[in-house]
């Protein structure tokens, strides 16, 4: 087999398109072969694997409940992106991860087919996380407790219920969500990705646009605040 030419140049967009093609294939196979419940779990796992493979190592992705020091718990979150280095995972309920709210950077709802119903439900799930109380403690390198940054939220899917480009359908739905249900980012692999209510990608750039916007937004949030564990035993 001939060796590839050492041209000193690499097309990053082509690499991402290959990753996107692989995701499309994986999610399409899950739809055909899996029982609906198993299909949902397989779809979530494909997205979790993608995040854990390509996000910087300080971040980790998993399905989880989010909890706070007052004993409040979110709805079940399909994918939570959380602090990898300083966050404990509490396994309290049949092996399901429970993550302290202070450690969460972003939450995503995952569906095979995006509809207006699932956009609304994703917003409500985001609100169930954002309403939790997050502590912030002093640490040797921290002079003052750090205020927790706003948690990002979004939706991920293979397809949408709308034929053709769906940005015109998604934007009005996003604008109608209350502030605590805001969806910051989303990716519909076959139709495009969005950031906020004004910025949308072309369909063929869906995954690269979404991942690069997420990787841009996460560092802007800074490090997760130091958890005040003295409040959790209460």
Image: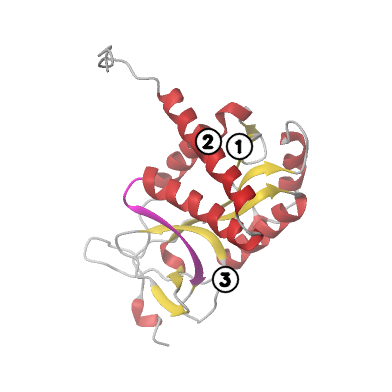
Whichever of callouts 1 and 2 sits on the residue coming sooner in the sequence is 1
Q: Residue at x 54, y 78 (%)?
A: 72
Q: Residue at x 27, y 18 (%)?
A: 1
What number is the disc on residue 207? 2
**Could you tell me which residue is drawn at 52 percent across and 40 percent down?**
23
Q: Secondary structure at mark 3?
A: loop
Q: Is residue 43 above or below residue 14?
A: below
Q: Is residue 191 visible?
A: yes
- Please identify the quadrant where the C terminus is shown: bottom left
Q: Is residue 11 left or right of residue 199?
A: left
Q: Nearer the viewer, mark 1 or mark 2?
A: 2
Whole-number angstrom distance, CA of label 3 to CA of label 2: 28 Å
Q: Which residues are magenta?
A: 56-66
Q: Seen from this angle, which residue lies furthest left?
A: 140
> Is-magenta flag for residue 59?
yes
The answer to whether residue 185 is visible is no
Which element carries disc 1, helix, strand or loop? strand
- Percent position of residue 198, x then y: 66, 35
Q: Quadrant of residue 69?
A: bottom left
Label 1 with label 2: CB-CB less than 8 Å: yes
Q: Position of residue 231 (x, y in %)?
A: 39, 81
Which residue is tagged 1?
193
Q: Which mark is residue 74?
A: 3
Q: Is residue 107 magenta?
A: no
Which x, y percent locates residue 39? Answer: 60, 56
């Amino acid at each position: 087999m001939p060796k590839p030419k050492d041209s000193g140049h690499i097309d990053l967009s082509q690499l991402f398109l290959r990753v996107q093609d692989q995701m499309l294939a994986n999610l399409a196979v899950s739809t055909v072969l899996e029982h609906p419940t198993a299909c949902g779990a397989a779809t979530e796992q494909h997205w979790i694997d993608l995040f854990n493979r390509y996000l910087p190592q300080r971040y980790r992705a998993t399905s989880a409940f989010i909890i706070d020091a007052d004993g409040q718990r979110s709805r079940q979150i399909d994918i939570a992106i959380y602090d990898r280095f300083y966050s404990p995972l509490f396994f309290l309920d049949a092996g399901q991860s429970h993550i302290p709210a202070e450690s969460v950077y972003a939450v995503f709802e995952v569906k095979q087919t995006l509809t207006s119903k699932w956009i609304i439900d994703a917003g409500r799930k985001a609100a169930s996380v954002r309403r939790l109380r997050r502590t912030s403690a002093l640490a040797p390198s921290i002079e003052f407790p750090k205020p927790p940054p706003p948690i990002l939220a979004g939706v991920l899917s293979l397809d949408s219920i709308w034929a053709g480009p769906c940005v015109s359908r998604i934007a009005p739905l996003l604008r109608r969500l209350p502030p605590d249900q805001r969806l910051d980012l989303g990716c519909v692999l076959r139709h495009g990705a969005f950031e906020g209510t004004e910025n949308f990608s072309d369909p063929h750039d869906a995954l690269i646009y979404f991942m690069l916007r997420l990787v841009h937004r996460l560092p802007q949030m800074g490090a997760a605040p130091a958890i005040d564990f003295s409040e959790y035993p209460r």
